[in-house]
């Protein structure tokens, strides 16, 4: 009953944009730290962006810094990942996750203490 529902993935050309959404179902995301992760075929899941609380600076992986923006809309119980200037290297299944900011110790890695995971949404960047 408690889950994260992702949407917004799809096929986009290099240089294009997509906005991923992660909506809490059955619980509020307000108290949680939120992370976006991705996993490309044959590669390990990696952290893309994390926002540990409503205050403080979000984390961005070096590979996406300046192109991606994480944000949250508490009224809609939704977290977004705005992805601009997309590259073919961004092709992956993207997952959102929620966890206690107290237990995460600002670690934006998939093996940290994340309590809930979304089902994943495919992002394909190709001409």
Image: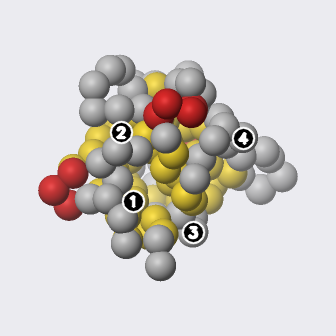
Q: Secondary structure at mark 4?
A: loop
Q: Residues within 10 Å of mark 4 (few under 14, many from 20)?
A: few
Q: CA distance from mark 1 to mark 4?
A: 19 Å
Q: CA distance from mark 2 to mark 1?
A: 11 Å
Q: Secondary structure at mark 2?
A: strand
Q: CA distance from mark 3 to mark 4?
A: 17 Å
Which residue is drawn at the image coordinates 37% and 72% (left, top)?
Answer: 26
Which residue is tagged 3? 119
Residue 56: tell me if it is visible. Answer: yes
Q: Mark number for residue 22?
A: 1
Q: CA distance from mark 3 to mark 2?
A: 18 Å
For marks 2 and 1 on the same chain, the one whose residue lies earlier in the sequence: 1
* Colour convention of the picture: secondary structure
Which residue is tagged 4? 111
Circles 3 and 4, Cβ within 8 Å, touching? The answer is no
Q: Mark number for residue 70?
A: 2
Q: Nearer the viewer, residue 111 or 125?
A: 111
For marks 1 and 4 on the same chain, the one whose residue lies earlier in the sequence: 1
Q: Nearer the viewer, residue 88 or 27?
A: 27
């Amino acid at each position: 009953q408690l889950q994260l529902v992702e949407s917004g993935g799809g096929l986009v050309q290099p240089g294009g944009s997509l906005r991923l959404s992660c909506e809490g179902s059955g619980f509020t995301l307000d108290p949680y730290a939120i992370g976006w992760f991705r996993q490309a075929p044959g590669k390990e899941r990696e952290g893309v962006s994390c926002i540990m609380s409503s205050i403080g600076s979000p984390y961005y992986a070096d590979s996406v810094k300046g192109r991606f923006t994480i944000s949250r809309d508490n009224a809609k119980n939704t977290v977004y990942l705005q992805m601009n200037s997309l590259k073919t290297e961004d092709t992956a299944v993207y997952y959102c996750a929620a966890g206690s900011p107290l237990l995460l110790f600002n670690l934006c890695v998939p093996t940290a203490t994340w309590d809930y995971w979304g089902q994943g949404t495919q992002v394909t960047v190709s001409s």
